[in-house]
Image: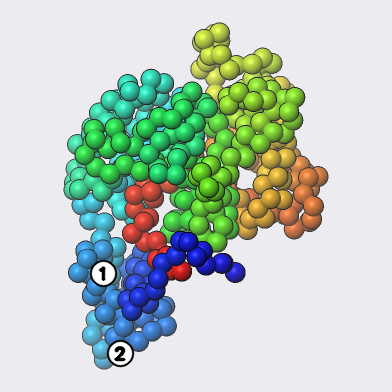
Amino acid sequence: MRKINPDNFTIATRGTSREINRQIALNLIRTHQPISRADLARLMNVRRGLASLLVGELLSENLIFEGATGEAVGPGRKPTFLYIDSRERSVVGVDIRATRTFIMVTDLMGRQLSGVSSFPTERDFNKLIVELGRRIRQVLDDQTAPGVCEGVGVSVPGMVDVGGSTIVHAPTLGWRNVNLRDPLAAALGVPVHIENSGKACALAQVWATRGDIKASSDLVFVTVSDGVGVGIVIGGELLRGRHNIAGEFGHVPLNVDGPRCSCGATGCWEAYISNLATLSRYFGRDLTNQKLQNSEVLDFTVEDLIVRARAGDGKALAAVHATARYLGLGLASIITTIDPARIYVGGEITTAWDLIEPTIRTALRERTLTGFAAATEIRVVPAEDYPRLRGAVALVAAPAFAAPMVA
């Protein structure tokens, strides 16, 4: 049960029930399109007249449109199908990582309109803003039917303030208290929304409409790349905490005497399972200082390591399995703390899932308290699904479909 906050509440009005029904209708159209008014009424378990009234409101606000007609069932009229109106409306998703920055353009439904482009991430924040603005304008200009850009969503590898404008701390980039939203919005002339990468990935799963994505109100997304991001959804909402930094499991220590983390502390989960940690384990030395590494090491990726592991390289297998064990230990902490219905895992290391899942499951059995906790469902999200980019897009598109806040 949820307690009503006497200091922060929203009073229900005469129009509250209609607003709720309107959002339900909008989300059902989004999930089931193309859909007729009659089918919408059946899904909502309401009279056809009420469904038609709600559809009329959504049509007048240009949130949906009427498309093709279907075949009549019996002597009635042919049904007219309804669709979310994403025509000539685009969204730009940006994924900033420590090494590279990725850009993708979609429609309002998250359907990809072009290929994903990328460029090396500039650590100088001011230079990155200039380059990012130029790149975004270029990808929009390259669209054959660009229409109106509704906004830009940006996934970042760090903590974002409550106001959603400033990156409070991004250890892998060395940024503190950097206002990303406002200068980028000024450069582009469109709204900009920024979010932590783990939270963005979780948001991507919440708003996914594909048939193979089961609806779940309680889930966790763990993204493993240059760093480690974790997004937590409880009761259908992102868990944010007082300062919007909830879910930073990547910086919870596995061993306080462990290796140095990018945040400056020692023994963080990230220091054991990030791509850099896995590669450092393979080469037998700390690769944190890139300037001290030769070109062979600098160009070597986790994907290259996995290829060697599959070819029978003993050192590569040992490095991958060690990462798998540490990944499992950290997941056990998340399961014990959150008890999610499902955990999603993304990142380059997941391309070796068939090799590492048994090791992860063994760690879960060792460190969770019950058999059903150890059996928690874990789903791999492949890199080609671009969860960070899709989460960035959802920052712009999802608010229109959000449930109204009452009480």
**Viewer-side residue, 252 vs 100:** 252
Residue 223 visible in image: no
Task: Choose the circle earlier in sequence order: 1 or 2.
Answer: 1
- Residue 70 disc label: none
- Name the residue that disc number 2 marks: 74
Q: Please tell me in which quadrant of the rendered image residue 53 appears.
A: bottom left
Q: Is residue 111 left or right of residue 156?
A: left
Taking 125 as reference, is 367 left or right? Answer: right
Q: Position of residue 234 (x, y in %)?
A: 56, 57
Query: Callout 1: helix, strand or loop?
Result: helix
Q: Please provide percent x and percent y for residue 239.
A: 54, 51
Residue 68, picture quadrant: bottom left
Residue 214 to residue 127: above or below: below
Q: Residue at x 48, y 56 (%)?
A: 206
| Residue 130 position within the rendered picture, expressed as x and y whole percent measured from the top left | 28, 25
- Packing grade of label 2 (10 A; few <14, some 14-19, many >=20) is few
What kind of element bears circle 2? loop
Amino acid at dot 2: Gly
Left or right of 388 in this view: 354: right
Give the CA separation, mark 1 to mark 2.
28 Å
User: What residue does disc 1 label?
Assistant: 58
Task: Out of 236 and 214, give the one closest to the viewer.
Answer: 236
User: Residue at image x 72%, y 25%?
Assistant: 258
